[in-house]
Image (cartoon, helix red, strand yellow):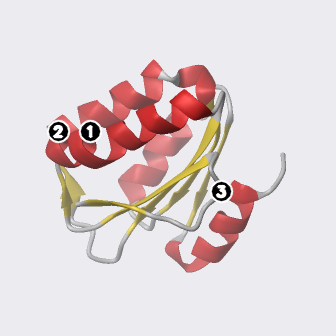
Amino acid sequence: MIEHLSNFPDDVLAFVCKGRVTKADYDSVLVPAVVKALEKQKRVRLYYETAADFSGIDPGAMWEDFKVGMEHLTRWERVAVVTDVEWIKQTMRFFRFLPGEMKSFPTSEAAQARAWIIAAS
């Protein structure tokens, strides 16, 4: 499940992933939020957190994640990923060459990640 988090500035999209994440979660929560934000903002920031009960992501959801990221490649200003899941941290390292700032944080540093994502560049 993907939950859209509130209490972030308009240019920050914030989500927490809980349990198993599916393509339907992307289709019903994440993608519409991204589209709506990009209608209003030239560039956006993304805060993406995995909850303690995160149990994985289905292949269809992984593909949607890749498509959303690549489709709006130049419009991501900053990306903060909060996770203790090793394969997600490794994937982040692989995509560091992309435009925009990307940073991963352990779950114990979620408050620092939130501060970083909203801080002025």
Gap between marks 3 and 2 measured at Cα: 31 Å
Instruction: Answer whether labels 2 and 1 touch (C-beta < 8 Å).
Output: yes
Give amino acid for label 2.
Pro
Identify the residue at image location x=52%, y=38%: 37
Whichever of labels 3 and 2 marks the residue nearer the N terminus, that label is 3
The residue labelled by disc 2 is 59
Q: Quadrant of the C terminus?
A: top right
Q: Nearer the viewer, residue 24 or 100?
A: 24
Report x, y in % for residue 34.
Answer: 44, 38
- Horizontal relation, residue 74 to residue 88: left or right: right
Location of residue 78 (image quadrant): top right
Q: Quadrant of the N terminus?
A: bottom left
Figure check: 107 above or below 14: below
Secondary element type, mark 1 = helix
Secondary element type, mark 3 = loop
Q: Is residue 98 visible?
A: no
**Going by the picture, which residue comes out furthest to the right?**
121
Mark 3 residue crowding within 10 angstroms, few (<14) / some (14–19) / many (20+): few
Whichever of labels 3 and 1 marks the residue nearer the N terminus, that label is 3
Location of residue 53 (image quadrant): bottom left
Secondary element type, mark 2 = helix
Query: Given this view, does label 3 or label 1 mark the residue nearer the observer?
Result: 3
Gap between marks 3 and 1 measured at Cα: 26 Å
Identify the residue at image location x=22%, y=58%: 56
Q: Which mark is residue 9?
A: 3
Give amino acid for label 1.
Met
Identify the residue at image location x=60%, y=62%: 8
- Horizontal relation, residue 93 to residue 66: left or right: right
Figure check: 103 above or below 40: below
**Going by the picture, which residue comes out furthest to the front?**
40
Report x, y in % for residue 63.
Answer: 25, 31
The residue labelled by disc 1 is 62
